């Protein structure tokens, strides 16, 4: 086994142990405010990163789909008093269906057009929730959504909630990772890079995009269920423009090219919003500045930044002996494929690609 | 019938306001392919600054003229400081404008707080007007908004069709590289157009803020309506923005009057219909 591989396995083990042991050493405040919140925001951001990184579709509709699921569940369980699982199933299904409708409308477009149309879709969901009094109860929204009792699992207990959310987050992450490497995911990446060529090869680009967006809607729906249980309520304020943009902020801060970025961004975001607010009221300005800095200087987000730093560090250490070797390595032609495409690409080559063309990804139009 | 005329007038005048807001958005997009998601924030900035100027000097007209100019300066700074260095990378430009919009919204909230601000509109514009032909009385101020929209529309048309700058802008929309290849300072034109777009957002802020009130969250509303107007009308087309704004204004007012709960859904449905029949918008060109 190569050293890189051993390092990876060791790192992964430490991470898993840390995540599992987190409620044991952290205060309840940390578990609730940072742990759970990062996880369910991270789940929604995962869907967005999959859309953006693998499919080239930066969507602003994810929080609206989150809201559709949360509202549906709240209406089913609180207004109509049906059991929790009916609410969960209805919420996720409804969010997925609406995502499919949104996808049919917007998947013809790409790049900035896609952003505009999904933003319009998201804001329309918001205004509907705000205006409607029959189902969504207008500006107040629906209160009193209780985390349920699932057999012996007491979801209202913060530690239990944390572990359930962690499990779901891990499943969603692994699922997306798998789909990204399956034939569907590879075709999707091909479509992202060159839709015309993939069309000529017989792939239906539109169908791939619609399916991906629907899948991301399903994930946003799961996030919506968890988030609404967490908040105990849902209102238009949970899905307004700020929240809509926050998910994009999380994804971009973490790094649009890496699925892991969703959780890195979410942890960073919840840390800033929780702790910056203790010494300044302007934590949104802090978030905005961080976002601006990432958008301007580090298009690969915090993960890209840390990988780049690591790469520079290792290069400096091994510089003397390996100088000739390094320069003889073939430089990969610029392409948008700096994403974690397949395992056959070795770790440091991936880094090379990532640093060689940090700007390629944006040229989608 | 009288009610119908009033609702129609509401729709048309609201369309005028949407047009002023969306024209700047569309202009910037058409030439520079920048989706300025801070457009709503520039609207809100204009509305607040205009209120402050009006409050300090007591002159509403002064606010109407100076606040948009201030917003234009902010717009040029935004373009020069941030967008210029990542020019051509459309997605990153859109992300940067989102970052700017977060910061502007937060700083405005810090300075103005969460309450509503009401403008003091001059008496000459404030009273009702008797429209003899249509047989209804209608607020003069709403007609003033329509007049401003017409002036902006005609002004933009003259600028684009009958001036050298307009010629450059139109050429730039078609082929940016060629324009710069024949020796025109495209960067200067970009800065001017961004300033003009921001100025229109600021102007919409003052006239829109005077119509109702100014409060946090208006940035999202006007960003949304600017988006819908250009999606329906066609991106980058001023004529399209006019048609889109009129349609959105009318449909939303009829919706609000006759099917209040679902007015948002009707606007949404209109967007879907246009996108499915003409994906590039009513007057948009395929790119």
Image (cartoon, coloured by chain):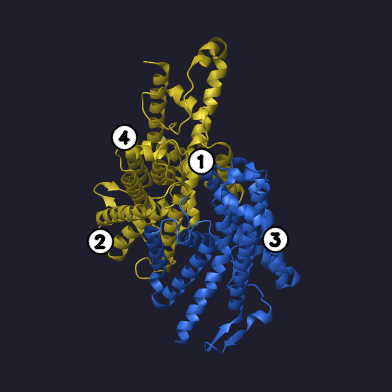
Residue that protrudes farthest toward the top in the picture: A321
Residue at mark 2 shares a chain with residue at mark 3: no
Q: Nearer the viewer, mark 4 or mark 2?
A: 4
Q: Which mark is residue A82?
A: 2
Residue visible at 42% across and 33% down?
A339
Q: Does the CB distance between marks 2 and 3 fall below 8 Å?
A: no
Q: Where residue A107 appears, x then y in whole percent?
A: 37, 50
Q: Seen in the image, is A61 located left or right of residue A293?
A: left
Q: Which residue is mark 4?
A: A178
- The mark that comes first in sequence, 4 or 2, is 2
Q: Which mark is residue B69?
A: 3
Q: Quadrant of residue A323?
A: top right
Q: Quadrant of residue A181?
A: top left
Q: Nearer the viewer, residue B107 or B124?
A: B124
* Element marked by disc 2: loop
Whole-number angstrom distance, CA of label 4 to CA of label 2: 35 Å
Q: Nearer the viewer, mark 1 or mark 2?
A: 1
Q: Quick one: label 1, few (<14), some, or many (20+) residues within 10 Å? A: many
Q: Is residue A246 above or below residue B20?
A: above
Whole-number angstrom distance, CA of label 2 to CA of label 3: 57 Å
Q: Where residue B225 appears, x then y in whole percent?
A: 50, 63
Who's yellow, chain-wise?
A
Using the rendered image of the protein, determine whether residue A277 is visible from the camera's viewpoint: no
């Amino acid at each position: 086994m190569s050293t890189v591989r051993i390092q990876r396995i060791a790192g992964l083990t430490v991470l898993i142990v840390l995540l599992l042991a987190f409620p044991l050493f952290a205060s309840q405040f940390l578990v609730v405010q940072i742990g759970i919140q990062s996880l369910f925001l991270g789940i929604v951001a995962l869907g967005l990163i999959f859309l953006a990184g693998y499919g080239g579709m930066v969507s602003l509709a994810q929080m609206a789909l989150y809201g559709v699921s949360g509202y549906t569940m709240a209406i089913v369980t609180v207004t109509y008093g049906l059991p929790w699982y009916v609410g969960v199933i209805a919420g996720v299904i409804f969010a997925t269906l609406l995502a499919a409708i949104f996808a049919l409308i917007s998947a013809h477009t790409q790049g900035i057009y896609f952003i505009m149309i999904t933003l319009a879709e998201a804001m329309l969901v918001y205004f509907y929730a705000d205006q409607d009094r029959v189902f969504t109860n207008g500006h107040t929204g629906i209160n009193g959504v209780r985390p349920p009792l699932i057999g012996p699992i007491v979801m209202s207990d913060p530690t239990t909630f944390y572990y359930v959310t962690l499990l779901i987050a891990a499943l969603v992450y692994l699922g997306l990772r798998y789909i990204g490497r399956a034939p569907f995911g590879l075709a999707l990446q091909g479509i992202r890079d060159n839709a015309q060529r993939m069309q000529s090869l017989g792939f239906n680009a539109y169908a791939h995009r619609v399916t991906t967006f629907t899948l991301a809607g399903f994930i946003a729906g799961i996030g919506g269920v968890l988030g609404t249980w967490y908040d105990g309520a849902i209102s238009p304020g949970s899905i307004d423009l700020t929240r809509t943009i926050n998910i994009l902020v999380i994804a971009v801060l973490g790094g649009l090219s890496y699925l892991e970025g969703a959780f890195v961004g979410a942890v960073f975001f919840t840390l800033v919003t929780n702790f910056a607010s203790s010494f300044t009221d302007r934590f949104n300005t802090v978030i905005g500045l961080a976002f601006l800095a990432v958008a301007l200087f580090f298009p690969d987000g915090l993960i890209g930044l840390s990988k780049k730093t690591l790469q520079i560090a290792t290069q400096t250490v091994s510089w003397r002996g390996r100088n000739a070797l390094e320069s003889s390595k073939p430089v990969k032609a610029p392409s948008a494929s700096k994403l974690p495409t397949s395992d056959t690409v070795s770790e440091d080559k991936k880094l090379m690609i990532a640093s060689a063309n940090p700007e390629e990804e944006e040229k989608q139009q | 019938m009288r009610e119908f005329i009033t609702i129609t007038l509401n729709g048309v005048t609201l369309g005028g306001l949407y047009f002023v807001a969306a024209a700047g958005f569309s202009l910037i997009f058409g030439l520079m392919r920048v989706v300025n998601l801070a457009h709503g924030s520039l609207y809100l900035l204009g509305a607040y600054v205009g209120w402050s100027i009006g409050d300090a000097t007591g002159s509403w007209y002064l606010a109407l003229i100076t606040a948009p100019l201030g917003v234009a300066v902010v717009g040029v700074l935004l373009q020069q400081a941030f967008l210029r260095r990542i020019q051509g990378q459309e997605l990153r430009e859109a992300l940067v404008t989102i970052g700017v919009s977060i910061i502007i919204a937060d700083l405005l909230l810090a300075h103005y707080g969460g309450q509503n601000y009401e403008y003091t509109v001059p008496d000459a514009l404030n009273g009702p007007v008797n429209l003899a032909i249509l047989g209804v009385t209608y607020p003069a101020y709403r007609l003033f908004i329509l007049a401003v929209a017409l002036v902006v529309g005609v002004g933009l048309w003259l600028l684009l069709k009958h001036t050298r700058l307009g010629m450059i802008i139109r050429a730039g929309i078609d082929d940016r590289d060629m324009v710069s290849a024949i020796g025109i300072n495209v960067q200067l034109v970009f800065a001017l157009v961004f300033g003009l777009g921001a100025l229109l957002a600021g102007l919409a802020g003052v006239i829109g803020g005077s119509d109702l009130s100014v409060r946090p969250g208006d940035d999202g509303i006007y960003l949304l309506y600017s988006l819908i107007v250009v999606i329906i009308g066609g991106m980058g087309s001023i004529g399209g923005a006019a048609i889109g704004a009129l349609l959105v204004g009318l449909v939303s007012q009829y919706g609000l009057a006759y099917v209040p709960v679902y007015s948002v859904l009707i606007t949404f449905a209109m967007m879907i219909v246009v996108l499915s029949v003409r994906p590039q918008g009513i007057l948009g060109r395929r790119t």
